[in-house]
Structures are given as C-alpha cells and as structure tokens.
Image: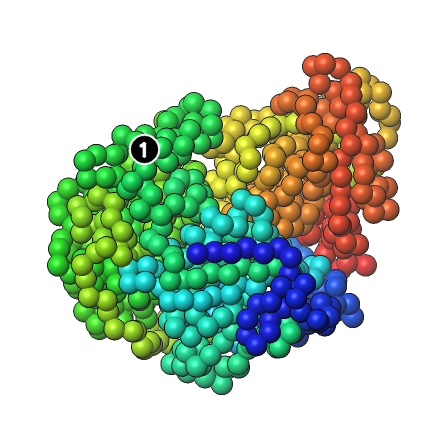
Amino acid sequence: MMKLSSDGVFLENGRPVPASEYHGNKDEGRDKTIAWSVLSAHNTSDSGEELRIRFDALISHDITYVGIIQTARASGLERFPLPYTLTNCHNSLCAVGGTINEDDHVFGLSAAKKYGGIFVPANLAVIHQYAREEMAACGRMILGSDSHTRYGPLGTMGVGEGGPELVKQLLENTYDIARPETVLIYLTGAPRRGVGPHDAAIALCGAVYKNGFVKNRVLEFVGPAIAGLSMDYRFGIDVMTTETACLSSIWQTDSLVEEYLTVHGRGESYRALAPAEGAYYDRCIEIDLSEIEPMAALPFHPSEAYTIRQLLTDGGDILREAEKRAEAQFGGKVSLDLTGKLGKRGLYIGQGVIAGCAGGMYENIAEADAILRSGAIGAGEFALSVYPSSVPVNMELMASGVQQSLMAAGAVFKPCFCGPCFGAGDVPANNTLSARHATRNFPNREGSRPDDGQLAGVMLMDSRSIAATAANGGWLAAADEADYVQPEPHRPTYNSKTYAVRVYRGYGKPDESAELKFGPNIAPWPDIAPLGDNLLLRVCSVIRDSVTTTDELIPSGETSSYRSNPIKLASFALSRRDPGYVDRAKAVQSLTKESVTEVLGRLGADTDAETTVGSVIFANRPGDGSAREQAASCQRVLGGCANICYEFATKRYRSNCINWGMLPLNLDADAVFDCEVGDWIYIPNVKSAVEQGSRRLQAVTMTKNGLGEMTLNLPELTAEEREIILRGCLMNYYAAQRKG
C-alpha cells in the first residue's frame, strides 16, 4: 500500500529510481522539481539555500485576522500591499454570548475598506474552499494564518503560519526559511469503490507522522494515478498533508486543473506543472491507491490510523490501547470508554459529521447521499450533520437534489462553518464516539473539558464510511462493502452569484478616511519589554506528554470568541491541560523587586545587573497542530520569556515563539530536564549570547535539591530573529525600525 524510502530518488521517464541506480547530479536534480520552480520564482534573496519568500496573496479567518491587523497597525501598516482575504468561518457561532463575534466581523470589514482588503461575510465559505474557488492558481504561493493552508492540486504552494508571518508580508518583508527538502509522493493505481480521499490521507498520516518522515518538508505529488482523481479527491488528500507535519505541498497539473480554473473564471491562470526529467527528491513515498482500504483515525490524532476491517475484527485490543492513551493523557482525571461501545453488531458510533475544508466538498457529500439513498438514519442516538464548504458548493448540492435527498434520510444541513473541526459545532455528548470527515481529532479540540469530567472521542473517517455507518444504524461499517450505485464523475459547475453580491473586494482601493470599528472586546496588545542582560525564569508548567498540541497550549472552541482580546484570552492558556498555569505565570509577573533580588542572591547571581524576569514552560515536543499564534502570544502576555523542549513539533509554532520574543530553547536528546513547577532557571549574559549568535547557553538551576547546571541550545536563529527576540517581540522590532 505504501513504500517509504529515505535514500533519495531521481525521476526517470516518469518513474522514481533510487539514487544509487541513476547517474545524475543531485544538486542539479533538486532544481528540477515543481516545488523548486515555485519557490525560486518567489525567492528574493541571492541565495538558493536561505530563502526570502514574498507571497502572492494572504488569507485569514476570524479567529486570527483581528490580532494580525492590530499587530500590523502597531508596526506601521498603511495599506495591504498584496491581496489579503478575510474569511469568517470560525467565529460565526458565538459560544459565549454577547456581541463579540459579530464585532470582530464589523472590524474586519472596516479594515478591508481602510487598508484595501477582501472580506467574505460569515457563512459564505470556509477559508480554504474560498481560496480554492477564488484565489489559487498555478505557480502561486499563498500564506494563510491557518495550518491547513494547502492548495497543491491547483499548482499553488500554500503555507500555514502564525499571524506574525502574515504581518511581515503586510509590511513588505519576507518569509525567511532554509530551502526545504522535497519528498516525492508517487501515486499509482485507482481508488476502489467506497474508498475516499480521507482514507488515503489517514493512511498517509499513519505512515509518516510519528516517525517525522516528512516534517518541515515539501510534498510533491506525481504519478499516473493523478489523472484518474477528481479535483475534489485531490483536495481531500492535499488538505490533510498538514497532519503529516510537512511544510507545504504541490501537485503536477493537468487538463482537469485547467477545467476547474476555467469553470471558476480563472482559466488564464492555468499552467502545466510537472517535474523535469532527472528531478531529484530527498525522500520518496510510493502509494498504490488501489490497495487503500476504508480507514479510521482513533482518538486523539489523525496518525492513529487503522483500517475499519481491523476495528471490526480486532476492535477490543485496538480500543483498549486508545483508552490507555487517554488515561495517560489526562492523568486519571477522566476516562474514555471505547470498548464499552462494542456490541454484537460491532462498534457503535453516536454521531456523524461531514464538514469543512476536508469533508464539505460536493463529491464527498454526494457519495454519502448515494450510500444513504436506500435507507434512513432513524430516530435513535445516531445523528448526521453536514456542513458544505461554501455556498456555491451548497447550490450545486441543491441543484442536483443531493441536499434534499440527504435531508429526507434524516441528515441536518448546517452553514458553511469550521466549528466541528475545533469544538464550536456539533460537540459530542460525554463519553460518546463521533465519526467525522474533518481535519483533526486532538484531545480537547472537539469540545471536551477533561477537568470538568467531560470527554468525548472523535474518530476521523471518510464521508463514505460515515454514510455507511449511518445506514447501518450507527454501527461502524466500511463503505467498500455498502450496496450502492456510485455517482457518475462530477463535472464541476460554479455559481458565484452570492460572492458577487456579498464579498467586499477592496484590494488596491484603500480608503485612508475609513475608520476602524472596534467592539468592546477588541483590545490592543499590551506593552512588552525588551530582553535584559540576564534572564531569570520560573518554571510554571511541566508537560511530559510525547507531544503537546496548540489546542492544549490555548484551547479552541468557545475560547475562540476572545481571540481579539489578548489579556482576556491569555486567561485560558493551558486551561484544559494545566489549569494552574495562568495563576503561576501571573504570580511571576507580580514579583516585587525585593523578591527577585532574594532569588538572584540565592542563585549567586549579580543582583545589580539588568535582569528580565519571566515564566517558562517545558514540554517534550510542543506545537503540533494549528498555526494559531495565540499558543505563543498568550504565554507572552502572561510574562512568558521562553519555551524549553527537546524538539519543536512544527516550524510554525517555533516561529510563533520567536515572533513573540520568547527564546525557543531545546535540550540535547540525552539531557534530563529535572526541574519541576516552581523551580528557577537563571541564564546569565543571555542578551550578549543572542547578539553574538551563540548556540549553547549555560544556565543555573535552583530546585528543591539545591543549585545545579543546565545546558540549553538556541539553534538556527537568523539575524532578524535574534533582533526580534532582543527587542521583545515583532511589534517592537518594527517600531524600532520606524524610529530608526
């Protein structure tokens, strides 16, 4: 089904050949990939190794755009220098009451008018479907403040990053990155009936996430199977590449891409993209799509991949392992009963959801309808909700009769909303199991509150098998065994009338006289101090899980409503993983000068020197998942000055830490972090170390066992990143440039 090779391959006559069997130059071959053709066209530096990228367009949703614009304003923003689209698909349901969500939307429209942006009102489209329909084009690059910014099948390299990276583009600066390695994804075969794009995506995540096989690399999809895949199928695989921890993705293009762009009014933007003969790839993954089976990703990660056949035959053992993971994850505070859902008919699912940028496309929903046409969901516990990805998609579903048919079978259609993906829509009942064609199933993400005894499990599945399960009364079923007539290949149509009358298109037409409209919850960033000569850190959270997601660092769901108020939002930091963190961090912020002097004296430090005092969290591998900058900014607002880890889970979270002035420190693999909450870490001469580009910092620790020593690594900081940390954050860095 899937073959991984880390030795490097060349492409010869359209097929991968091991580097050891091909007489070619690797350096020349690297320049022959599609990925490099796009990256090099956007690179403004003289170096082919240290890239400085300028993107063609930006896109954000309503959890992130207020903070981005506020940051850019504080940094000197005058206009949007490139197309910047603001969508409203995350905060379109106000989970906390009041006016604060719609206030953000009003602010967004006023900003689009003032600075010359594009504004997509609530419930018209989810962010990535709008980008597919209206923005992506062959050879382009789009930067989004959402981790699932992926438009590879249209020949666009999408990159999801935290808000400060978009701020840099708005201020006409660059996205700086070392040239990434490229991984060939070579597709052969044809998917079997009943096997959808989510099945292939889950299988891929299961094969490459835990071993870091594609981490921070670009995935390039090539191979004979692509011609047989519809655009929706390609999109469905591509958007899930985020869950592999890769940097971006790109696909070879063909006549179907040209047709899609033409139907969507952008036929002139088509360009044939394909690797040249002799293209070299650092790694290769060969996937035979004909061998992919219906899949399920168990709680709590898309990489917990099993075939549905395995769950139906060996479900007890597999589910018990998942229960053990939940027990370890939540420290016994709450348990998740999965084995109790096993019965004579297999595994019982209490809810089905087809939604968003992964599930809400026409073909996924139409095939679910085909499977359910001969049955009904019934009046039991099982419920099915469908969230189309855009109004144009929903209009197709209505025109074809798919929507009416699914509703007659008992499905409920919802707005174009991303809520089920992050816990603000169709939150499951406690201790139930929900099957979702959505992007993620992280702990705490679907709405659970473990500290309050509330925990549900989300299992990712393709819409086809969700429909088969619905037709089976909620008992898990694989779509490849369902008795149904597969719909004819979908030829896309596109009715954009709603966009024509509702989307504000102000790019290139900024109105300086327009006033920004602030709701009472929209607050500016607090002042952030620069880095002092020395740094005194108090450990305020220690998380020893193998991976810590951004959802644990700052929960999604109802907290999203507060994303425009930095101080209010910060009160939720780590609230579902370490509820005592916020009070501890605030206590450090409140330390008196006398208290600090006493601690420095006990550490044997210079009590008269300029010393920055702040908090620090330790996690083994923080930052998996969402690109949201608030995972870092909330720590900074609470006085956080550093993260210590063995490895950052993603580049984007590490970048968020840097852009918010927090030192991204890591330990040697064989080092032991023996500090606990309340211990102290003192880093003398930290300012000069950052200035000089030092990569090893010597620290003094004070624990219950007395004084000790610790070596901290500070690798791979660019000159600009060092300056950002020295200034305290990206806003301070730009403010200094303006004064300059």
Q: Pick whichever, 665 or 179, lies toward us.
A: 179
Q: Residue furthest front?
A: 21
For mark 1, give the secondary structure.
Answer: helix
Residue 508, horizontal then vertical, whole percent: 56, 76
Q: Quadrant of residue 688?
A: top right
Residue 551, horizontal then vertical, whole percent: 49, 41
Name the amino acid, label 1.
Answer: Gly
Characterize the local packing of mark 1: few (<14), some (14-19) or many (20 or more) Cα atoms within 10 angstroms: some
Residue 289, horizontal then vertical, whole percent: 40, 62
Q: Pick whichever, 54 or 71, lies toward us.
A: 54
Q: Residue furthest top?
A: 705
Q: Pick whichever, 592 or 647, lies toward us.
A: 647
Residue 486, horizontal then vertical, whole percent: 23, 67
The residue at the point 21 percent across, 44 percent down is 474
Residue 661 placement, left or right of 547? right
> Does the image show residue 30?
yes
Quarter of the image with the N terminus is bottom left
Q: Residue furthest bottom?
A: 268
Q: Which residue is mark 1?
A: 316
Picture colour scheme? rainbow
> Does the image show residue 251?
no
| Position of 672 relative to 730 (above/below) | above
Q: Pick whichever, 596 or 305, lies toward us.
A: 305
| Position of 220 relative to 456 (above/below) | below
The residue at the point 68 percent across, 47 percent down is 658
The residue at the point 61 percent across, 77 percent down is 276
Residue 220 placement, left or right of 499? right
The residue at the point 57 percent across, 60 percent down is 284
Q: Quadrant of residue 332?
A: top left
Quarter of the image with the C terminus is bottom right
Residue 369 placement, left or right of 662? left
